[in-house]
Image (cartoon, helix red, strand yellow):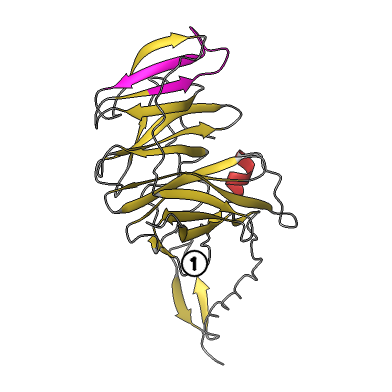
């Protein structure tokens, strides 16, 4: 199924070329393989394929980029994380980080124009292996860093940074976690590494959630079954700059074509006036040809 830190290849393919917004919602393509269907326990068939849905849950901006994050999922399984970015105000979009199999991205925050983070976890029977995606170039490139020192259940409920290097996360490790359900971890390296500050059974009161970006927002648009990326104008009006369809594709077994085998080439017949003569005591492959005289 999945390696501890979410490094296995995604079960859905990422867009190879930028998506260009021209007034109609864009489709983030997702295609399952039969191996994905089997490993995720999906009941998808050729006759009844499983719909794949896009869910976007986070938006922020850094440098000249808009960043939105979420996941692709079926009715019963989370397939992969999705990170989308635009550096031209929403006209064209790319995926600056590979999709993480079974991953889901939840919160995004830029501390300044260059430094930002997106939180996520691996979603299976239990949410596990919480991580952050980190950028220090305004969202152009991202790298994945685990929050817990060892693989295990957990989700990042809150995170916040007081500087480009100092930050705190609150991880819910589940009711049966050793030492307590809630762990508070801190970093002095911008999220590259983490250490535990405290563990307890009661949820601590931490004011960590980053303030929402007042100039941008994500809105579900029922009429087009899409998510809209909207910018707030000086007049206070919200203007859509891009949209992404909820419907992202289908999971179904790949049909294999039954092809006729190529016709066999007729073997070259030996000349009618030649016969094979084998000498006694020599291997069969040591042969010579003699001419057959015509009467």
Is residue 108 positioned above or below 228 on the image? Answer: above
Is residue 26 positioned above or below 216 on the image? Answer: below
Asked whether residue 140 appears in the rendered view, the answer is yes
The residue under the point 52% across, 47% down is 11
**Residue extending furthest toward the top:** 179
Disc 1 is placed on an element classified as loop
Between 201 and 248, the one nearer to me in the picture: 201
In the image, residue 28 lies in the stretch drawn in magenta: no
Q: Position of residue 121 (x, y in %)?
A: 48, 32
In the image, residue 178 lies in the stretch drawn in magenta: yes
The residue under the point 53% across, 77% down is 275
Between 161 and 79, the one nearer to me in the picture: 161
- The magenta span reads 169-187
Residue 48's quadrant in the figure? bottom right
The residue under the point 55% across, 77% down is 267
**On the image, numbered disc 1 is attached to which residue?**
278
Q: Position of residue 208 (x, y in %)?
A: 39, 26
**Residue extending furthest toward the bottom:** 295
């Amino acid at each position: 199924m999945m390696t501890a830190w979410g490094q296995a290849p995604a079960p859905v393919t990422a867009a190879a070329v930028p998506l260009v917004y021209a007034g109609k919602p864009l489709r983030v393509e997702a295609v399952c393989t039969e191996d994905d269907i089997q490993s995720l326990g999906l009941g998808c068939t050729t006759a009844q394929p499983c719909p794949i849905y896009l869910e976007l849950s986070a938006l922020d901006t850094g440098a000249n980029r808009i960043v939105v994050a979420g996941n692709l999922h079926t009715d019963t399984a989370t397939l992969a994380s999705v990170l989308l970015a635009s550096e031209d105000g929403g006209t064209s979009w790319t995926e600056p980080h590979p999709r993480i199999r079974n991953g889901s991205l939840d919160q995004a925050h830029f501390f300044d124009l260059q430094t930002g983070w997106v939180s996520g976890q691996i979603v299976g029977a239990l949410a596990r292996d919480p991580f952050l995606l980190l950028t220090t170039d305004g969202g152009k490139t991202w790298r994945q860093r685990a929050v817990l020192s060892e693989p295990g259940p957990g989700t990042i409920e809150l995170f916040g940074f007081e500087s480009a290097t100092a930050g705190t996360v609150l991880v819910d490790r589940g009711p049966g976690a050793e030492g307590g359900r809630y762990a508070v971890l801190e970093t002095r390296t911008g999220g590259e590494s983490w250490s535990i500050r405290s563990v307890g059974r009661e949820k601590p009161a931490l004011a960590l959630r980053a303030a929402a970006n007042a100039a941008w927002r994500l809105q579900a648009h029922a009429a087009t079954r899409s998510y809209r990326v909207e910018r707030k104008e000086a007049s206070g009006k919200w203007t859509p700059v891009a949209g992404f369809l909820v419907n992202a594709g289908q999971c179904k077994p790949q049909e294999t074509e039954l092809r006729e085998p190529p016709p066999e080439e007729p073997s070259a017949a030996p000349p009618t006036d030649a016969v094979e003569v084998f000498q006694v005591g020599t291997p069969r492959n040591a042969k010579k040809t003699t001419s057959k005289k015509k009467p």
